[in-house]
Image (cartoon, rainbow, N blue to C red):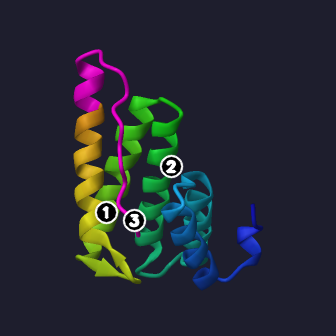
Amino acid sequence: MEDFDALSLEENHRLARRYWNDRNFFPAHEAWESCWKQSKGTEEEELFKGLSQLGAGYVHHRRGNPHGTKTLLRRGLSRIERFGPERRGLDLAALADAAREHAGVVEAAQEAGEEMPHLDPPRV
């Protein structure tokens, strides 16, 4: 994995999108976490924090952790919703819709004692 802290915010955002679209959610989460640190004190700090949390939510899904999945998807959702339908080339509306739906599906499966459902996050 890259040394995200040594890269620019723009490069980290580009890499995060690439990793996400390749379904590599852990490095996407890490790259957006670096963007979050790099944007401290700006309006976009919450955007990058939310994107990082969405990535972490899908990491938890892959690891079979329903509590971590639904919790981080909802945290990320609460942050990215503030930025409208599109920001920095991302379809935030589609991401928000997916996070909301996926958190609910995971929670319902958990409450029913079912296995972790398959989730298909949207491309960014």
Q: Quadrant of the C terminus?
A: bottom left
Q: Which residue appears at 29% of the width and 80% of the height? A: 86
Q: Earlier in the sequence, mark 3 or mark 1?
A: 1
Pointer 3 or 2: first along the chain: 2
Q: In which quadrant of the rendered view does residue 46 lie?
A: bottom left
Marking on residue 117: none
- Three-letter amino acid code of the residue under disc 2: Ala
Q: Earlier in the sequence, mark 1 or mark 2?
A: 2
Query: Which numbered tag is attached to residue 56?
Result: 2
Q: Is residue 18 left or right of residue 49?
A: right
Q: Position of residue 107 (x, y in %)?
A: 27, 31
Give the image location of residue 63, x and y in percent.
53, 33
Q: Which mark is residue 95?
A: 1
Task: Give the overall secondary structure of the magenta segment.
Answer: loop
Looking at the picture, does residue 57 appear above or below residue 37? above
- Element type at mark 1: helix
Q: Which residues are magenta?
A: 107-124
Q: Is 69 in the magenta? A: no
Q: Secondary structure at mark 2?
A: helix
Residue 6's place in the image compared with 21, above or below, is below
Q: Secondary structure at mark 3?
A: loop
As measured in the structure, the alpha-carbon distance from the residue carrying label 3 to the one carrying label 2 is: 16 Å
- Residue 39: image quadrant is bottom right
- Name the residue tied to disc 3: 123
Within 10 angstroms of label 2, few (less than 14), some, or many (20 or more) residues? many
Q: Nearer the viewer, mark 1 or mark 2?
A: 1
In the image, residue 111 sits, relative to residue 75, either above or below, namely above
The amino acid on which the numbered mark 3 sits, given as a three-letter code, is: Arg
Q: Amino acid at mark 1?
A: Leu
Tag 1–tag 2 contact (CB < 8 Å): no
